[in-house]
Amino acid sequence: MLTLAVLLLTMASSAGCAHYQLGNRSLYQPDIHTVHVPIFKSNSFRRELGERLTEAVIKEIEAETPYKIADAATADSVLRGTILVDNKVVQGNNTLDEPRIIQESLQIQYQWLDQRGQLIRQPATLDLAPVLRSSTMTTTGLLYPEPGQSMVTAQQSAIDEFAREVVRAMQAPW
């Protein structure tokens, strides 16, 4: 009799009303397991900027989410985007009017779509996290030429910031 009661209690506790997830999987869409990230298009004249952005986004997705990167035919969703603007702005000059602080900014438009081509939206019940939709984001990186930094360093800083923000936006609201 005691074993029957323990068995019934175990079955009742395992069959709850809600589906709970543990770990970082609970932060992300439960129905999505794979993401395809095609190479970001680029309206910039700088070489390989789209490829570098794509690589950073893929690395961030693999490192911070439970999603796996897959090819277009087998992925549950697609994250695609375009670099719209690539600007350099002088932030500070020395006494000889030479640029000493330069800001590199990238304006990137992106979308996260399911395989049916529908935008992936988070449930609207709680609006605590930003909704990932077709969005434009501007990220920046600073360049200090005197200590030996290059434009590539400033671009990579902006690219890494974009990758982190996109992955944060992929999280579901609690």
Image (cartoon, rainbow, N blue to C red):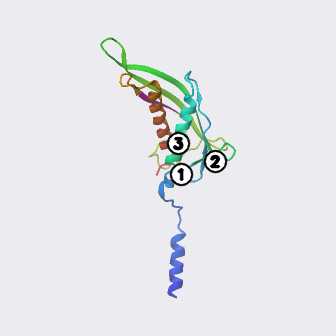
How packed mark 1 is, by other alpha carbons closer than 10 Å (few <14, some 14-19, many 20 or more), is some
Residue in view at x 53 percent, y 74 percent: 12
Instruction: Return the residue nearer the eye: 85 or 123.
Output: 85
Dividing the picture into quarters, in which one does residue 95 lie?
top left
Give the residue at mark 2.
Answer: 76
Q: Is residue 117 left or right of residue 148?
A: right
Between the C-alphas of marks 1 and 2, the distance is 13 Å
In the rendered image, residue 66, in percent from the top left (x then y), is placed at 53, 51
In the rendered image, residue 138, in percent from the top left (x then y), is placed at 47, 30
Nearer the observer: mark 3 or 2; the answer is 3
Q: Is residue 37 left or right of residue 143?
A: right
How packed mark 2 is, by other alpha carbons closer than 10 Å (few <14, some 14-19, many 20 or more), is many
Label 1 residue SS: loop
Q: Is residue 82 visible?
A: no
Residue at far bottom of view: 1
Give the residue at mark 1.
Answer: 66
The mark that comes first in sequence, 3 or 1, is 3
